[in-house]
Structures are given as C-alpha cells and as structure tokens.
Image (spheres, rainbow, N blue to C red):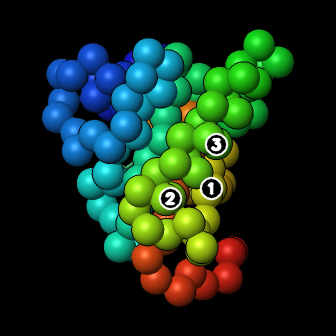
Amino acid sequence: MSTIFSKIIKGEIPSDKVFENERILAFKDINPVAPVHLLIIPKKEIPDLQSVSSEDLSLISEMVVVAQQLAKEFGVEDGYRLITNNGVPSGQQVFHLHFHLLGGRKLGALG
Ligand code: AMP
C-alpha cells in the first residue's frame, strides 16, 4: 500500500533529506518532538516492523548503521532513542516502516 512516504521517496512530496542511498532515505520529521527528530525509512515498501521478513534483515541492519551515522552527524551519539511504532495501538500513523531517531533533550520514560 502506497503511503505519503512513498511519495517522498519518489520526490512527489518535498522532504528535508539528511541521508539517501539506493535502499534507504532519512529526513527530518515534519512535526518534531525533540530538537533532533529524524525518520529513517527503507525505500522498499514494508508496512511495519511485524512485516519484516528474513530477506529484509540486512536492510534493517543498514538502517541501524545509518542511525548511528546520523546520531554522530547531529551530535547526539551520547544519548538518543531509536524507536518504531508497530500498529495502530502503538500510535503508528504512516504504514511504511520507519525508525524515529530522537535526541537533543532529556527523553522521558516510555509508555
Ligand atoms: P508514526 O506515528 O510512528 O507512524 O510516525 C509518523 C511520523 O511521520 C510522524 O512523526 C509525522 O510527524 C511524520 N510525518 C508525516 N508526514 C510527514 C512528512 N510529509 N514529512 C516528514 N514527516 C512526516
């Protein structure tokens, strides 16, 4: 299912890109909840974490490496949170897998 993130990947909707290669795109969240709030997404259409298959595992690993690099680039490598919402009860709004990279302030408890 195509989402707004597919349109961002295709360049049909603008985004504030911070990283791109053939497989992965990262951009600033349009509604940041922290001074650093980036979204790291695969270009492959995967709806959520629960839909990740074994063939996608190298892609997920690469997303983690991109997160590490971006954390350094944005100066939050000493303290950040990498999270993904899976499904409506978790608060997921866009059904294209994405990691939120949050940092730059003291982050509260999860819940
Ligand atoms: P989630 O609730 O985990 O599905 O997160 C979706 C995130 O996408 C939210 O934090 C939104 O602010 C963000 N978002 C939605 N549309 C855009 C957009 N066009 N550009 C950047 N971020 C967006």
**What amino acid is labelled 1 in the image?**
Ile
| Alpha carbon separation for disc pair 3 and 1 | 11 Å
Tag 1 residue: 83
- Residue 107 appears in which quarter of the rendering? bottom right
Q: Residue at x 41, y 56 (%)?
A: 73
Tag 2 residue: 71
Q: Is residue 75 left or right of residue 29?
A: right
Give the x, y percent position of residue 46.
59, 23
Q: Is residue 99 left or right of residue 59?
A: left
Q: Is residue 94 left or right of residue 87?
A: left
Question: Is residue 62 shown to the viewer in this render?
Answer: yes
Q: Which circle, 3 or 1, is nearer the viewer?
A: 3
**What amino acid is labelled 2 in the image?**
Ala
Tag 3 residue: 64
Pick the residue in front: 13 or 79. 79
**What amino acid is labelled 3 in the image?**
Val
Q: Residue at x 58, y 28 (%)?
A: 47
Q: Residues within 10 Å of mark 1 (few under 14, many from 20)?
A: few
Q: Residue at x 42, y 23 (%)?
A: 21
For the C terminus, which image quadrant? bottom right
User: Is the C-beta separation of discs 3 and 2 under 8 Å?
Assistant: no
User: Is the C-beta separation of discs 3 and 1 under 8 Å?
Assistant: no
Ligand 1 contact, mark 1 (Cβ < 8 Å):
no
Question: Secondary structure under badge 3?
Answer: helix
Q: Residues within 10 Å of mark 3 (few under 14, many from 20)?
A: some
| Alpha carbon separation for disc pair 2 and 1 | 13 Å
